[in-house]
Amino acid sequence: MDNMRERISRVMAEQFRVPTERITEAASLDSDLGATSLDRVEVVMSLEDEFAIDISDDQAAELHTVGDVLAVVSANVARLRQPAAPPA
């Protein structure tokens, strides 16, 4: 999880042009990190590329804090690691 947190922090710091120290779980994407709507779309795309996941539009709309981002990325990565169900 720490490696994932570090990767998310790096991606977000680059996207929002802020020091990684400002990327805390409680940080608001808008008020604390200064994200615009375009920044939010671009960071979702960057995280999808970084972790080889798909973040749905519904999930993206619920990303308000770095903690939200961590939860969504973690859930999507965990979903990828589950073995595929055998065909019925």
Image: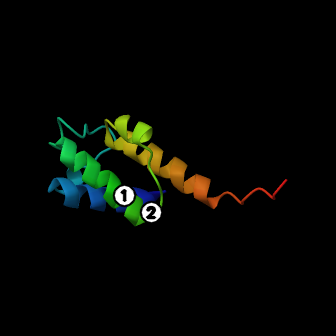
Q: Which mark is residue 24?
A: none
The residue lying at 27 percent from left, 49 percent from top is 41
Amino acid on which disc 2 is placed: Phe
* In-front residue for pair 38/80: 38
Image coords of residue 88 (percent x, y):
85, 53
Locate residue 79 relative to residue 31 in the image: left or right: right
Question: Where residue 15 appears, x then y in whole percent?
Answer: 21, 57
Q: Quadrant of residue 64?
A: top left
The answer to which quarter of the image holds residue 51 is bottom left
Q: How far is disc 1 from disc 2 in space, using C-alphas?
A: 6 Å
Q: How many marks?
A: 2
Would residue 26 be found to the left or right of residue 37 on screen? right
Tag 2 residue: 51
Image location of residue 69, percent across then percent down? 38, 45
Task: Answer with left or right where residue 52 lies relative to residue 45.
Answer: right
Residue at left offset 44%, top offset 49%: 55
Numbered circle sitting on residue 47:
1
State the image quarter where residue 8 is shown.
bottom left
Residue type pointed to by label 1: Leu
Secondary structure beneath label 2: helix
Front position in the image: 55 or 33: 55
Say what secondary structure mark 1 lies in: helix
The answer to whether the residues at label 1 and label 2 have Cβ atoms under 8 Å apart is yes
- Asked if residue 56 is positioned above or below residue 14 in the image, the reply reads above
Outermost residue, right side: 88
Identify the residue at horizontal 33%, vertical 56% (top origin): 45
* Colour mapping used in the image: rainbow
Looking at this view, is 25 or 30 the one in front? Answer: 30
Residue 75 location, x and y as percent? 53, 47
